[in-house]
Amino acid sequence: MKNVVKVIMYTYRENNGKKEFFVLHRKRGDCVVLTGHVRDREEIKNESLEDAARRETIEELGVEPMNIIDLKTKIYVEIEKNNAAGYEHAFLIQIPNKDVHFLEGDEKHNWHSLEELDAILTYPNQRESLNKIKLS
């Protein structure tokens, strides 16, 4: 089984003083926040978790994060389709208040309040950090 290190990105913007979180509503029916992998290639051998979260936000949404907070959450996950297992590290990421789209596919997205995330996120590992976000 391959070892992976992932980042979960609770990406939000401020709109009229309220946080709105970016959620993908994928064609296969699940709802997820953004995730990505820490690179382990030679040219970026020492990519930090925060650097990976920054890079993935830019790659997936095309915007530079304004603020990144490490939620100090480490969640074990198994990825059956890739025969991989490892840990996801959670980050709260603020982006500018502008319209963005998922750049790595034609998945639908919507903006949701923090209160809505617990009900709509499909996977328990992505709901696990919601209480830490409320305290941030």
Image (tube, rainbow, N blue to C red):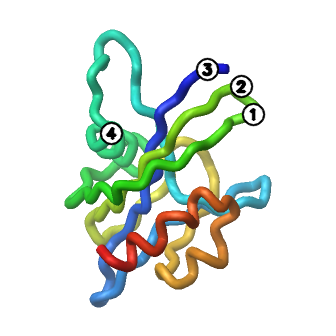
Describe residue 84's horizontal placement relative to residue 22 as left or right.
right
Q: Are circles 3 and 2 on residues that touch, CB within 8 Å?
A: yes
- Callout 3 secondary element: strand
Q: Which residue is labeled 1 in the image?
A: 80
The residues bearing labels 4 and 3 have C-alpha atoms spaced at a distance of 18 Å
Mark 3, residues whose alpha carbon is within 10 Å: few (<14), some, or many (≥20)?
A: few
Mark 4, residues whose alpha carbon is within 10 Å: few (<14), some, or many (≥20)?
A: many
Q: Which residue is labeled 3 in the image?
A: 2
Q: Amino acid at mark 3?
A: Lys
Q: N-terminal of the two: label 3 or label 2?
A: 3
Describe residue 75's horizontal placement relative to residue 16 as left or right.
right
Pinpoint residue 81: horizontal percent, then vertical percent.
75, 31
Q: Which residue is labeled 4 in the image?
A: 49
Q: Amino acid at mark 4?
A: Leu
Q: Amino acid at mark 2?
A: Asn
* Of 66 and 124, the residue lying toward us: 124
Q: Quadrant of the N terminus?
A: top right
* Of 130 and 18, the residue lying toward us: 130
Q: Which residue is labeled 2 in the image?
A: 83
Q: Are circles 1 and 2 on residues that touch, CB within 8 Å?
A: yes
Q: Residue furthest left?
A: 66
Picture quadrant of residue 134: bottom left
